[in-house]
Image (spheres, grey):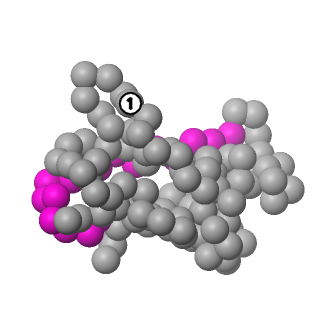
Amino acid sequence: MGYLTTHVLDSAFGCPGSDIQVKLYRIGAKRELIATVTTNSDGRCDQPVLEGEAFAKGVYELEFGAGAYYRRRGMELPEPAFLDEVVIRFGIANEDEHYHVPLLISPYSYSTYRGS
């Protein structure tokens, strides 16, 4: 059975993105919140964000609290911040695979890819 993991790397400070709230939504007829986790000191989540029978084909969104993270670090961001909530929409096509969705962030940019 497959599962979903994520982690955050902070390119502005050159470190893992720790203590970042991550919300997972299933996208269907409506946007349904199905999990909320927080990254650890290594920028990772202690458990998979989605696994077991809940891990199903479909469209999902990971929402990362990047603005709150940078404000806690003492960075002055404009109001509104250029990037506050970073949302990555992706699809799960195979229920037997590991999907890893990492996020590389700074206050003014981000990138992602399907990791391993």
Give x and y (percent) for residue 57: 17, 48
**Is residue 42 found inside the magenta-colored segment of the image?**
no
Secondary structure under badge 1? strand
Residue sitting at 48 percent across and 65 percent down? 47
At x 72%, y 47%, the residue is: 68
Looking at the image, the residue that sits furthest to the front is 53
User: Which residue is at a point 38% across and 30% down the rendered structure image?
Assistant: 32
Quarter of the N terminus within the rendering: bottom left
- Apparent side of residue 111 relative to residue 50 in the rendered image (left or right): right
Image quadrant of residue 38? bottom right
| Left or right: where 111 falls relative to 39 | left
Picture quadrant where residue 114 is located: bottom left
- Total number of numbered labels? 1
- 59 and 113: which one is in front? 59
| Residue 62 seen anywhere in this rendered image of the structure | yes
Q: Is residue 116 left or right of residue 15?
A: left
Residue 35 image position (x, y, % from top left): 46, 45
Q: Which residues are magenta?
A: 81-99
Image spot of residue 54 (x, y percent):
28, 48
Identify the amino acid type marked 1: Glu
Whether 48 is drawn above or below 16: the answer is above
Q: Residues within 10 Å of mark 1 (few under 14, many from 20)?
A: few
Q: Nearer the viewer, residue 91 or 74?
A: 91
Say which quadrant the C terminus sits in: bottom left
Q: Is residue 36 above or below residue 38?
A: above
Please tell me which residue is depicted at 68% across the width and 73% down the height of the picture: 41
Q: Which residue is mark 1?
A: 32
Q: Quadrant of residue 95?
A: bottom left
